[in-house]
Image (cartoon, rainbow, N blue to C red):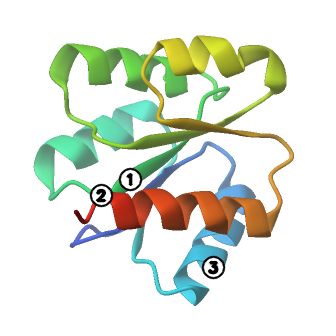
Amino acid sequence: MAEPSAHDILLVDANADVRHCLTLLLEQKGYAVATADDAEQAVEFLRNYPHPRLVLLELEMDLPGGWQLLASRCRDAVLSRVLSTTGRSLRCAALALGVDDVLEKPVGADDLLAVVGRYARASMT
């Protein structure tokens, strides 16, 4: 898990390469990014540090995974804005569990930055 401070985004993905690439992309656009490689680390981060403006969550991680983090969100109300990356077949289930938006894989950089920008700005108001 990345060292915590005030962050714009918490990026939760089990794939280290994906975390690295997305972190670089988001940091190049000026976002402060914290990372977690599973839902357990994400919940720990959210309970112990200032909440980020949004959480970018890979739903289809191995356990403990994105679905468990969403269940925690419902139980503990520890998350505010959540964006999810998943396949088209799980879009409706993700939205039903309270995800603010779903980015369908594969996600292009321009699409990711547009959606992240929209939610990051909205959470500032």
The amino acid marked with disc number 3 is Leu
Image coordinates of residue 121 in percent, x first then y, are 38, 67
Q: Closer to the N terminus: mark 3 or mark 1?
A: 3
Residue at left 45%, top 15%? 97
Distance between mark 2 and mark 1 Cα atoms: 8 Å
Residue placed under numbered mark 1 in the picture: 54
Residue at left 61%, top 28%? 59
Local crowd size for mark 2, using a 10 Å CA cut-off: few (<14), some (14–19), many (≥20): few
Residue 23, numbered circle: none
Secondary structure of the residue carrying tag 1 is strand
Secondary structure of the residue carrying tag 2 is loop
Is the residue 48 above or below the residue 94 in the image? below
Image coordinates of residue 94 in percent, x first then y, are 57, 20
Residue placed under numbered mark 3 in the picture: 24
Residue at left 28%, top 16%? 74
Residue 92 found in image quarter: top right
Distance between mark 3 and mark 1 Cα atoms: 17 Å
Query: Of circles 2 and 1, which is in front?
Result: 2
Apparent side of residue 41 relative to residue 84 in the rendered image (left or right): left
Apparent side of residue 87 relative to residue 124 in the rendered image (left or right): right
The amino acid marked with disc number 1 is Leu
Query: Of circles 3 and 2, which is in front?
Result: 2
Image coordinates of residue 36 in percent, x first then y, are 45, 50
Q: Are marks 3 and 2 in contact (CB under 8 Å)?
A: no
Residue at left 48%, top 29%? 99
Local crowd size for mark 3, using a 10 Å CA cut-off: few (<14), some (14–19), many (≥20): some
Query: Of circles 3 and 1, which is in front?
Result: 1
Q: Nearer the viewer, residue 123 or 4?
A: 123
Residue 123, numbered circle: 2
**Quadrant the C terminus occupies:** bottom left
